[in-house]
Image (cartoon, rainbow, N blue to C red):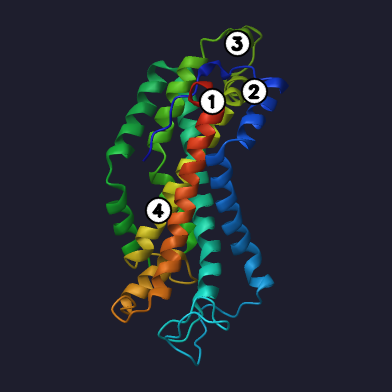
Amino acid sequence: MTALTETPAAEAAPGGGVRREALYFALRNGKLVTGFVIVAALLLLGLAGPAVFDLADPGAYGTRPMSPPSAEHWFGTTTFGQDVFAQFVYGLRTTFAVGALGGGIAAVIAMAVGFTAGYRGGLVDEILNMLTNIVLVIPTLAVLLIINAYLGIRSVAVQALFIGLTSWPWAARAIRAQTFSLRTRDFVALARLSGSTTRKIIVREIAPNMSSYLFMTFILLFGGSILIASSLDFIGLGPTEGVSLGLMLQNANQWSAMQLGLWWWFLPPGAGITAIVGALYVANVGLDEVFNPKLRET
């Protein structure tokens, strides 16, 4: 997983001027704008595509199998006559859902562990750090393979849950390190002296001053969840119902699309996964440049 460039802890106590400055540079950062435009366009296609294009059931068999792209079937058809464009649009929905759920679960766990360990320190930090290291060295993909193989019915929610429960350690360690640098700041000490509880100090003082860092962490977790889910789908351990971009690749491989020359079957889902994950990482680099003045292009 790509590591985050450490953003300055001096992001503390941001005001309206800082937010306006960040927005100014964000709108002028080519990487950030390009990445978010690509992700937003694909997300919009997945959400509104079925209604806008009046798509049929992506699993319905057609009467024109193995047809190349045409005005009737924009992305061609499969060996069973299924419309590849319909599968692609519905697959985008599933792919984004897995990324959001898996990345969201991992982000929540990472923040809970990282904030608590970084702020409390001592024995609490040692215990949470030990738990993080244990999960970190577990072969995640192997565990997911075993669990998924023994599940009779696999759903998108269950897949996202397992991904979220196993992909949070690196983010927790990064958040813990940032919390260590912020907990000694004057505004945190003042909040502690005023009698604020640990939860309030973390929620009201530390977390807001790491908002950009947390957002960048979620983007990386989002992209990582999509890659893991696509890998599971491709080897046949994805959801047993529905369609996703990874499942499209798995079906194309299973029914010898490459050998039959049906390039329109496997290229769209492969390009879709690459575009989503690539755009997310490019946008993350752009965000790093926006929030870290040392990295901004002059």
- Drawn side of residue 64 relative to residue 197, left or right: left
Distance Cα–Cα, label 1 vs label 4: 34 Å
- In the picture, the disc for residue 204 is 2
Which-is-in-front pick, marks 3 and 1? Answer: 1
Front one among 92 and 177: 92
- Drawn side of residue 43 relative to residue 152, left or right: right
Which amino acid, mark 1?
A: Thr
What residue sits right under mark 3 in the picture? 192
Q: Which numbered disc flags the more N-terminal residue, 1 or 2?
A: 2
Residue pictured at 47% horizontal, 22% vertical: 178
Q: Determine whether label 4 and label 3 are within 8 Å by CB.
A: no
Distance Cα–Cα, label 1 vs label 2: 34 Å
The secondary structure type at the circle numbered 4 is helix
Where residue 201 appears, as percent x and y from the top left, is 60, 19
Query: Quick one: which residue is furthest to the right in this view?
Result: 16
Distance Cα–Cα, label 3 vs label 1: 40 Å
Distance Cα–Cα, label 3 vs label 2: 12 Å
What residue sits right under mark 4 in the picture? 227
- In the picture, the disc for residue 298 is 1
The secondary structure type at the circle numbered 3 is helix
Where residue 109 appears, as percent x and y from the top left, is 48, 38
Residue pictured at 28% horizontal, 43% vertical: 138
